[in-house]
Image (cartoon, grey):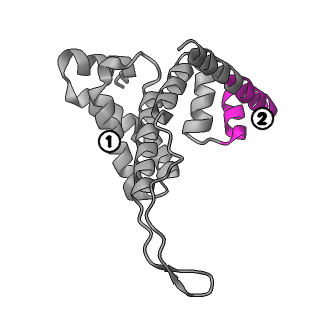
């Protein structure tokens, strides 16, 4: 039986030795997790596969900026960012052609960019990602399972040996800490 290399060992092999197979191992290890998140976000298999590919490409390019946190969570966050950007781009690009109103009469709706788009959204996501990465490992894992992997509260409770209500309270408290941390960071800018 061979020892399974850790994520850190694989990343070191990629960065120090240019070992492409080590990154392939990381991809195999986390593709299904990232795909699950991408599919829930994109609601389309082809678009989800595109997000997964782009996420791993970006993760590879930014591997030197990896700070030692859970690699699966890190690449999942990257996929989430990419998916949100693609959805926003698609939303702005959509054109509405001649359609029929409720009475069957044709109406032409002009293509308008979404004025509600806030360009600071990406910056906010980065602040959130940074705040999540600074959480204690146990809290970070719960956030990953709940928000990135979409696990039910009962499943999370079973994994950590707590009740579902305890998990709800923990998630609430974690979210409150994250909000305060981000608000403090915003106030210090």
Q: Which residues are magenta?
A: 152-174
138 lies left or right of 38: right
Q: Earlier in the sequence, mark 1 or mark 2?
A: 1
Relative vertical location of residue 148 with respect to residue 98 in this rendering, above or below: above
Residue 26 on image: x %, y %: 34, 31
Relative vertical location of residue 53 with respect to residue 46 in this rendering, above or below: above
Secondary structure character of the magenta stretch overall = helix
Residue 150 on image: x %, y %: 59, 42
Residue 63 on image: x %, y %: 31, 23
Q: Quadrant of residue 93?
A: bottom left
Q: Which residue is mark 1?
A: 54
Using the rendered image of the protein, determine whether residue 138 is visible from the camera's viewpoint: no
Per the rendering, the mark at residue 134 is none
Quadrant location, the N terminus: top left
- Residue 156: in magenta span: yes
Judging depth in this view, the residue of 155 and 119 nearest the camera is 119
Q: Nearer the viewer, mark 1 or mark 2?
A: 1
Judging depth in this view, the residue of 4 and 110 nearest the camera is 110
């Amino acid at each position: 039986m061979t020892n399974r290399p850790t994520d850190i060992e694989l990343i070191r092999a990629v960065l120090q030795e240019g070992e492409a197979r080590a990154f392939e191992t990381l991809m195999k290890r986390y593709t299904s997790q990232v795909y699950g998140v991408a599919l829930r976000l994109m609601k389309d298999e082809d678009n989800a596969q595109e997000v997964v590919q782009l996420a791993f490409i970006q993760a590879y390019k930014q591997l030197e900026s990896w700070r030692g946190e859970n690699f699966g969570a890190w690449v999942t966050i990257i996929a989430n960012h990419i998916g949100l950007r693609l959805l926003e781009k698609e939303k702005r690009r959509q054109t509405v052609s001649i359609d029929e109103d409720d009475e069957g009469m044709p109406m032409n709706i002009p293509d308008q960019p979404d004025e509600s788009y806030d360009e600071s959204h990406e910056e906010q996501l980065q602040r959130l990602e940074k705040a999540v990465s600074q959480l204690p490992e146990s809290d970070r894992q719960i956030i990953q399972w709940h928000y990135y992997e979409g696990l039910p509260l009962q499943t999370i409770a079973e994994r950590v040996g707590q009740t579902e209500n305890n998990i709800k309270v923990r998630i609430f408290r974690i979210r409150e800490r994250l909000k305060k941390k981000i608000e403090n960071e915003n106030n210090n800018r």
